[in-house]
Amino acid sequence: MMFYLFDIIIALMTIILACLCLFSRQAINSITYFIALGLIVALIWTRLGAYDVAIAEAAIGSGVTGALLLFSWRKLRAAKSNITLTENTISKKVIATAFFIVVIIVFSLSSILLFSKPNSALAYLVDSSLSDSGVLNPVTAVLLNFRSFDTLLEIGVLFLAALGVYSIGISLFDYELKPSSNFLLHSLSKLVVPACVLFGGYTLWVGSYSPGGAFQAGAVWAGALILLRLAHPRLLARKLSPWLLTIGLIVFIAAAIATFVINKNFLLYPALYAGKWILLIETAAAISIALLLYSLFFIPKKINSKSAANTITDDAGESI
Amino acid sequence: MSIQVIYLMAGILLFCLGVAALILRKNPLIQVVAINVMGIGVFMWFIANGYSIDIIDNVPHALVLTGIVVAVSATAFALLLLVRIQTRGTTSAGDRDDV
């Protein structure tokens, strides 16, 4: 029982944080608790042996999502003059009823689960064909070899989201070119940005044989870009190259066509060079993931366009 | 009883809490957070399901990695739409839905 104590404490912490996050009155408290929740969940992923997911959760699930929420909270607070973002308190009875229902569902489902064994046939399948995949990290093998179509479409989804953000035409961060005078931000960016770039490259490289890969690298790089943009707005104020934004998708699709020509099968890499194909696709994917995630925050516009609202229709079409 | 069961239960509970908050809360920002918490619940269920002492199933890990990226894309789009709706009300001084 002592062995499970850690897990029980962590699981309880997750639930308590989720309750605090979802039922606190102020939106800013919710967001803060959500970021904390993401970090605790990343701890759970390492506990369950999902190291790749832990890195992605900490970087994307907690970091990027948290930053998106904070930015939009600030934007909403600045925009609202009489919009109330804190609603009336929910009556305690409603919460109690909902919680009661939730508890019933949990215990009914978990009692079913207690008597069912997980099916690990796929795990053995991945394990046995790992040597043919060209990489040693099973997660990378699944993502970029066995199920590479999923990853191709996933980058497509990210690209579509960025396109959607462009077409909405407002930026979560106000467009200002004045360098930030925040001393803390400046010294933090000096310390953290080089470390982020290095760690992202390292994650990308080791992704073939240990936890890491394109998505983690891209997320860490995106974090570095966002921090750099906040500290030195002028440095990154130009338009993002549309080629760099789409290079992941382009290389992936080109690889799919090339493999079709060679092997008469989409994304079936030549057996001897599979590792090199995967590394090439991953590098391209990481670059565009970083830029796509970054472009969710800051719409690249022409340097002298001050007000976002006026130039929506003019810029949305051509900026990508 | 193994650690798998603890996290399976926690995953389901997180999902249910997310659903409850999505229904009960009126603040759209917190509703977006609630959807994300539901997502975390699903991910936890997936990964706990792939966990066992002898072999760790890596297919759910890959699926969850994909899921995290798709979730952040959807969240960003939802938040931008939300900000757009709210700021639109202030720019054009007309009728506005109080959210």
Image (cartoon, coloured by chain):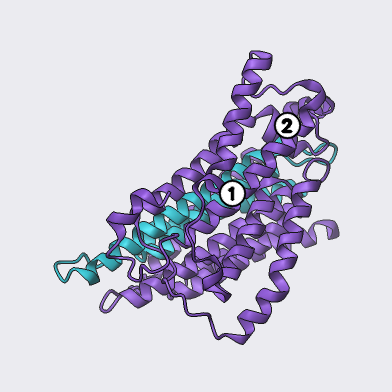
Chain colours: A purple, B cyan
Is A140 situated above or below A10?
above
Is A303 situated above or below B39?
below
Is A312 situated left or right of A239 in this image? left
Q: Residue at x 72, y 23 (%)?
A: A269
Q: CA distance from mark 1 to mark 2?
A: 18 Å
Q: In which chain is the residue bearing label 1?
A: A
Question: Given the image, on which type of amino acid does mark 2 rest?
Answer: Trp
Q: Residues within 10 Å of mark 1 (few under 14, many from 20)?
A: many
Whole-percent x, y for residue A230 in the image: 55, 73
Quadrant showing the N terminus of chain A: bottom right
Q: Quadrant of residue A304?
A: bottom left
Residue nearest the observer in this picture, B95 or A181: A181
Residue pointed to by mark 1: A289
Residue nearest the observer in this picture, A216 or A299: A299
Whole-percent x, y for residue B74 in the image: 46, 50
Q: In which chain is the residue bearing label 2?
A: A
What's the mark number on residue A277? 2
Q: Is residue B22 visible?
A: yes
Task: Return the residue found at the far left.
Answer: B94
Whole-percent x, y for residue A312 in the image: 30, 58
Q: Residue at x 34, y 66 (%)?
A: A308
Question: Given the image, on which type of amino acid does mark 1 rest?
Answer: Ile
